[in-house]
Amino acid sequence: MRLPLEALRLYVEKHRTETYSTEEDAEWTVQKHLADIWRAREEAEMAIEPSLEHIPRFYAKRPTSAHKEASPTRGSTLSGVRQEVSKVARQSLREHMIAMVLEPSDLDRCWHLLKARCSPPISPMDERINYDDFCQVAESLPPLAAATFFCASHFLKFPLDRFGRISSLHFLQWMRCKNAILRTRVELSCYDGAGEGYLSERELEMWITDLIPQLPALSDLRDEFVPFYKVTAVRKFFFFLDPKRRGRVSLKHMLASPILHQLLELRRSDATADELRHNWFSLDYAEMLYSDYLDLDIDQNGMLSVAELARFRGGGLTMPLVQRVFQECHTYCNKETQQNEIDYKSYLDFVLASTYKAEPEAIAYFFRLLDLQRCGRLSGFEVSYFFRAVIEKIEELGDEPNCTVEDVQDEIFDMVKPCDPLHITLHDLVRCKVGDTITGMLTDANAFWQYDRREQYINHDGDDS
């Protein structure tokens, strides 16, 4: 069967001399011929795969190299057409998005128009505008800018007062935020090589490399530390935005995520040391993370062994938990010791899960470690197995546990209240709102010690107050 493009070309050459009374007739004839082509293709496909008649195709594999070698002319022609159409479509979309972005002068003009169209009763301290005046401001702007920012749905995003007005200042602040997101979207799309709305790890690293000179907070970043900083920054995006580990993050999810806004906070030249202290992307925080990694790496080979990771944050982690990290994460074999070790990327994933324990992605990370049978649920066996190691760790640290494995197992099931009283699923652990506490109780002796003595902390805080 010929390609639709080739068939249409032959059809045009064959009927070049035909005349039509109107353009509608000519268009109808072309569309009918094209429909016949697609119908013939569908019939040929259903002859090969009869299930297509009842189950529609929802996924089409990309042409393989073997397919291209079998029919080089058809494969090269189709591939060339697809690439060219994709390139033109991406360029057109990028130009459209660039046209939607407002310059600082345009935002200033919008503010002057909003102030000039204030709706009565006028209050200099609280300038407001109703929908009629709002529409008049939109008419004074270019059509694309008006359609992007000044529409009814945007007006209704803001609370109305008893006169049907919204705050002009709040609307301008929203405009600035939306404009910044649009600008970032255009910037990120330049690194989306496939044009599918996703960034791979390498593409995200390229964007961060070009972004670093634009961030005043990273002005002291040394050249030799740049590769480690890029890995540190990229891991947070992939840990939270790629939970299924597909190797790519969605641009849409990036723009909606507070992670991106935390990174772009470094653009501020007036950011204080206190604001940057807890910012994952700040230079001090990244250097602290890498310094901790080097401190754990006793043999200084650039990797962490089981014994080295067990020293993480005071050495409260249990050995079964640490061993599960090496079973579930990507490891490298040390040729000298013949032991598996993890690299800096896997270490950062573990740090992220330990730092943001209450987040669903962190709970899912620890759930994967606790799920020994990989069946998507925890039974009493898993709970008792991991907590028994916690008790042994407490005794190893010279303390006396004030509980038994059976008591804590019952307490954990009571805290979670799973749908199935005999098994705990990831959904149960996230829904109960104490998933971070439970994962800490089963993996870290220090975390369980704090939970077991929580009443003492509460009483101590009360006495201080």
Image: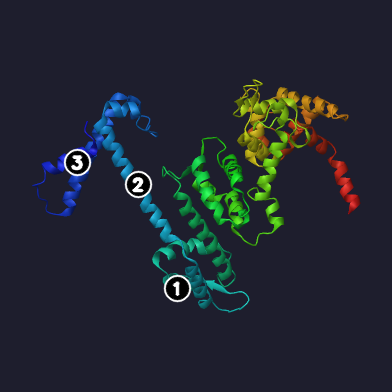
| Residue under the point 32% across and 45% down | 85
Q: Disc 3 designates what residue?
A: 8
Q: Is residue 403 left or right of residue 3?
A: right
**Mark number for residue 270?**
none
Between disc 1 and disc 2, the foreground one is 2
Against 18, residue 365 (above or below) is above
Which comes sooner in the sequence, label 2 or label 3? 3
Contact, mark 3 vs mark 1 (Cβ under 8 Å): no
Disc 1 to disc 2, how far (Cα)?
38 Å
> What x and y, as percent, mark residue 91?
37, 51
Q: Disc 2 designates what residue?
A: 87
Q: Is residue 434 left or right of residue 451?
A: left
Which quarter of the rendered picture does the C terminus lie within?
A: bottom right
Contact, mark 1 vs mark 2 (Cβ under 8 Å): no
| Residue under the point 43% across and 64% down | 145
> The residue tagged with tag 3: helix, strand or loop?
helix
Q: In which quadrant of the rendered view does residue 357 lie?
A: top right
Q: Is residue 459 visible?
A: yes
Which comes sooner in the sequence, label 1 or label 2? 2
